[in-house]
Amino acid sequence: MHQHAGHTDSGRPGAEPAKAAGAVSEPAPAPRPEGHEAIQRILVQAVTQGGLPGILAEVRDGDRQWFGTAGVADTGTGRKRSLEDRFRIGSISKTFVATVVLQLAAEGRLSLHDTVEQWLPGAVHGHHHDGARVTIRMLLNHTSGLFNCTDDQEALNRYETHTPELLVQIALSHPAAFTPGSGWAYSNTNYVLAGMVIERATGRALAAEITERISRPLGLTGTYLPHGSDPTICGPHSRHYTKLFQTDPGAPVHDATEFDSSMFWAAGGMISTAGDLNRFFGALLGGRMLPPETQRDMFTTVPTRDWISDAAYGLGVSSVRLPCGETVWGMGGALFGSWSYTYGTRDGEQMVTTNTNGDWTNDGWDDPIGIFTDLLQATFCHPSAT
């Protein structure tokens, strides 16, 4: 995730050494009832002290589920947030896209070693760019060096709608951050290209592939990628409130619920629910979405830079080492008025998803990520029983 206006995020980063493929940490102890009370206290503080309109969290431990909220879904009506609420998930979309790519790789329909030039001839060229040197794996783990298209707000603002081809064109008007494979930099352009590769390899729309391969089999009834520039959120949902990343406590609040997310598309345009995200990540972490070899590819991480603190990045997933020493796996995302985190134990047995329907905080936290880190601590870090 990035913190500039219009950017999807996925947490914000600092780096740790790359972890070995398939590394598994000891499962965290399951939250005890007082753990849920601690989570609820953080939710309340996020509203009363942090100034957020509303926040929700769903915790799953095996077949057990706990759901909590604070604040409101709609500041006009005072309606509370609910388990059914749909919200924009920003960069958590990347995990869905990476899963589809890896399923295609497991089916032999493409390889992570394939280059962008092989699948999208001529799409990455000019300004010293060479698509023949950028592999699909580099797209998925952000080691391509391609400029982040959503960092060029001036260019984005020149257009009413944003096709994937336009987003790539905007990115390629900037020099690369580094030669392919020689560094790490979070870039939404990588996942726009990954989405284009999926469509080229399957001959079908990305949204249809996500629905057929992930949402329908897992029963994720609230999860989808909007069609084109459709600005609506279908079904029950919270309002999304933004201060457009202004830090002044008195900055005006805007309603960004209806929002054309086409500039994010495969990199961050999806909509989901807390329950759906916990179900998807539980299945993914638990090895039920990918065969073992491809699963190892997804969870082989590289060090990150200028991103989430104590994080490493795999293929569409990240690991975060908490202050207590526990390591959790998942993804985060942010769009105007909606910040989300989904993380769990490496086996997927324990999961937590949280979402705020505002993108600012007041006292105590720099941004919602600070709140999310506190929630992860409360969920996965427990003192030894005495």
Image (cartoon, helix red, strand yellow):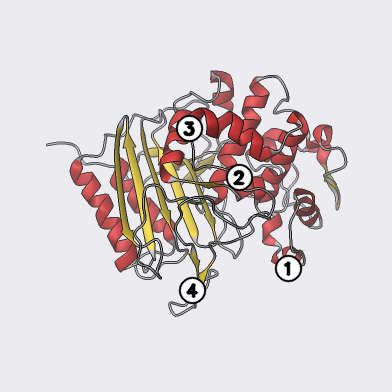
**In the rendered image, which residue does mark 3 sit on?**
219
**In the rendered image, which residue does mark 4 sit on?**
253
Q: Which mark is residue 154?
A: 1
**Callout in the foreground (2, 1):** 2
First in sequence: mark 3 or mark 1?
1
Q: How packed is label 4: few (under 14 Cα within 10 Å), some, or many (20 or more)? A: some
**Callout in the foreground (4, 3):** 3
Could you say whether the residue bearing mark 2 is in a helix, strand or loop? loop
The type of residue carrying mark 3 is Gly
Observer-nearest residue: 15 or 339?
A: 339
Q: Is residue 323 visible?
A: no
**In the rendered image, which residue does mark 2 sit on?**
225
Horizontal and vertical percent position of residue 373: 38, 51
Left-right relation of 227 to 60: right
Q: How packed is label 3: few (under 14 Cα within 10 Å), some, or many (20 or more)? A: few
The type of residue carrying mark 1 is Glu
First in sequence: mark 4 or mark 1?
1
